[in-house]
Image (cartoon, rainbow, N blue to C red):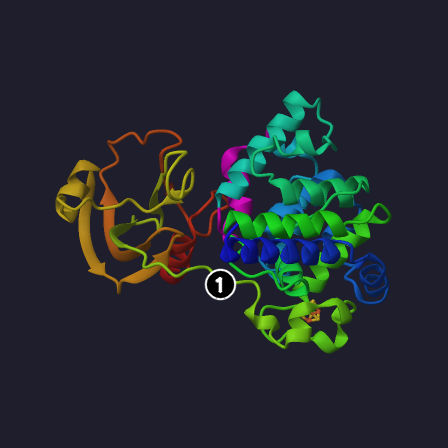
Amino acid sequence: MGLRTQESLINVAVKHTAVTERLAINIAPAILAWFDQYGRKNLPWQQNINPYRVWLSEIMLQQTQVATVIPYFENFTTKLPTVHDLAHAEEDLVMHLWTGLGYYSRARNLHKAAKMVVNEFAGTFPCEMDDLIKLPGVGRSTAAAIRSIAFQQPAAILDGNVKRVLARLHAVDGWPGKTAVLNTLWEYAEAHAPEERPNNYSQAMMDLGATLCSRSKPACNLCPIQTDCLAFIQGNPSDYPGKKPKKVLPVKQATLLMIENNKGELLLTKRPPTGIWASLWVFPELEENNSIESFCEQEQLELIEHKQWPSFRHTFSHYHLEITPIHIKASSTATKTMEAGKQQWYHPKGDTELGLAAPIKKLIKALA
Ligand code: SF4
């Protein structure tokens, strides 16, 4: 065996021993004691705990801050208090209740998953991991949160906040979007999850990441696991977790027509169930080779006046959309029959409940 090979085998062995030692660290007692004193216990989804409420809150909290989620959660559970209510709700109502929260695939998946719970699990929320991860939109960490918080069964969670805590605690290098890094974090998450008080432990880890171990300037002096934290000992917590590699997103263009009739109603069309803004209501788009005049003619609208608004940018995960809105005043010649469920006149002050894409909501507000 060459000297180099021998050396790298020794390095691997040393690293493995270090990971094994780190896996044995028991952080649960300190985390739970901290939770008893400082953990959040008054959030809306921590009252009247049941699997439906835990699941809904976990989905809403993905990519969204607690303060933003609270009013949405309260409104959603007032209108649709049970999984049965959600399963039987109209799609437009579900999307309406989600309007403004973003990442609308979460709402579509919620609706599908509620139907699955009712039809395939006889209306009873499953508690086994294998069943939970069959529900659309429920990944390993969300399933574990439902299992531990709603059913008080041991399960390891690994949401964004927990990834940050564990990456710092064990000085795990690399971006957690990479499989190898994620697998290491899961290994730690599983090793640390206790048998006792799994519900409080899951909540405590999320709270620790959201409050003390924040993205910038973590409050290490108040942290219950400071003495075990490698990033703290090294003096570089903000180096963890590793950053996502930057990529330049392409830019696409869209001209949106804000057509207003003489009753103050706006013409909206419903997007297909897949693709961007799936199943949401938006302003009609002017195709590149079409003109406002011929669009109005096709839609049997009499064009009165039109004005272009300044363009603005909306960013999706894989591209930027440069939106140019055009405000059109037109009167309907009213001979055209609207295709039900695909096109409608919408009054911003009326009581029609529709799911609106975020930039559309913003534009309607600006028009008002
Ligand atoms: Fe996070 Fe600091 Fe606690 Fe380490 S000591 S887990 S970096 S808050």
The amino acid type of the residue labelled 1 equals Lys
Q: Which residues are magenta?
A: 88-103
Q: Is residue 172 above or below residue 236?
A: above
Q: Is residue 11 above or below residue 149?
A: below
Residue 235, quarter of picture: bottom right
Residue 160 visible to an observer of this rendering: no
Residue at screen point 80% across, 39% down: 151
Q: Is residue 199 left or right of residue 358?
A: right
> Could you say where residue 238 lies in the image, as x and y percent from the top left?
57, 72
* Numbered marks: total: 1
> Could you say where residue 364 lies in the image, as x and y percent from the top left?
39, 56
Residue at screen point 42% across, 49% down: 357
Q: Is residue 164 left or right of residue 99?
A: right
Residue at screen point 40% across, 31% down: 341
> Could you say where residue 313 lies in the image, as x and y percent from the top left?
32, 61
Residue 306, quarter of picture: bottom left
Disc 1: residue Cβ within 8 A of ligand 1's nearest atom = no
Residue at screen point 21% across, 46% down: 286
Crowding around mark 1 (Cα neighbors within 10 Å: few <14, some 14 to 19, many 20+) is few
Q: Which residue is mark 1?
A: 243
Q: Is residue 291 left or right of residue 24?
A: left
Question: Which quadrant of the figure shows ligand 1?
Answer: bottom right
